[in-house]
Image: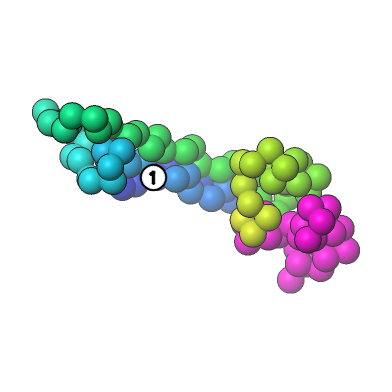
């Protein structure tokens, strides 16, 4: 739960997992647990590590990921070097400049 999957060939690490109650109270990931009435166990499953240099990903595919709600425009900029303008469109010249830095 504390050690996310490692990326390969330049890919970033995955997200760590977490176990808690819907109320927000933490819960141990192993062993017998007591769940209070009207509460529930919440599992945040870990994500896999990335594969390959994120800056090599086609910017149009990154834009698709943003439009599909997989990542935010800020994450596209930070992690993939892709600039998406205020209208949700790919800014190709700005992306090329960012990736060349």
- The image quarter containing residue 61 is top right
The residue sitting at 31% across, 38% down in the picture is 22
Quadrant into which the C terminus falls: bottom right
* Residue 96, placed above or below residue 20: below
Q: Which residue is mark 1?
A: 16
- The magenta stretch spans residue 4: no
**Residue 25 coordinates in the image, percent (x, y):** 23, 46
- The magenta stretch spans residue 84: yes
**Residue 90 coordinates in the image, percent (x, y):** 83, 54
The residue sitting at 18% across, 29% down in the picture is 37
* Residue 26, placed above or below residue 43: below
Foreground pick, 36 / 11: 36
Instruction: Name the residue at the bottom extreme.
Output: 101
The residue sitting at 62% across, 41% down in the picture is 70
Disc tally is 1
The residue sitting at 83% across, 53% down in the picture is 89
Quadrant into which the N terminus falls: top left
Foreground pick, 74 / 53: 74
Element class at badge 1: loop
Q: Work out whether residue 80 can be spotted.
A: no
Q: Work out whether residue 7 can be spotted.
A: yes
Q: Which residues are magenta?
A: 76-101
Instruction: Name the residue at the front extreme.
Output: 38
């Amino acid at each position: 739960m504390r050690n996310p999957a490692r990326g390969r060939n330049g890919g970033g690490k995955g997200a760590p997992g977490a176990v808690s109650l819907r109320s927000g109270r933490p819960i141990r990931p192993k062993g017998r647990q007591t769940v209070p009435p009207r509460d529930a166990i919440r599992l945040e499953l870990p994500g896999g590590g990335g594969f390959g240099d994120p800056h090599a990903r086609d910017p149009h595919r990154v834009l698709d990921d943003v439009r599909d709600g997989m990542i935010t425009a800020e994450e596209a900029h930070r992690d993939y070097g892709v600039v998406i303008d205020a209208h949700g469109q790919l800014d190709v010249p700005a992306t090329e400049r960012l990736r060349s830095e």
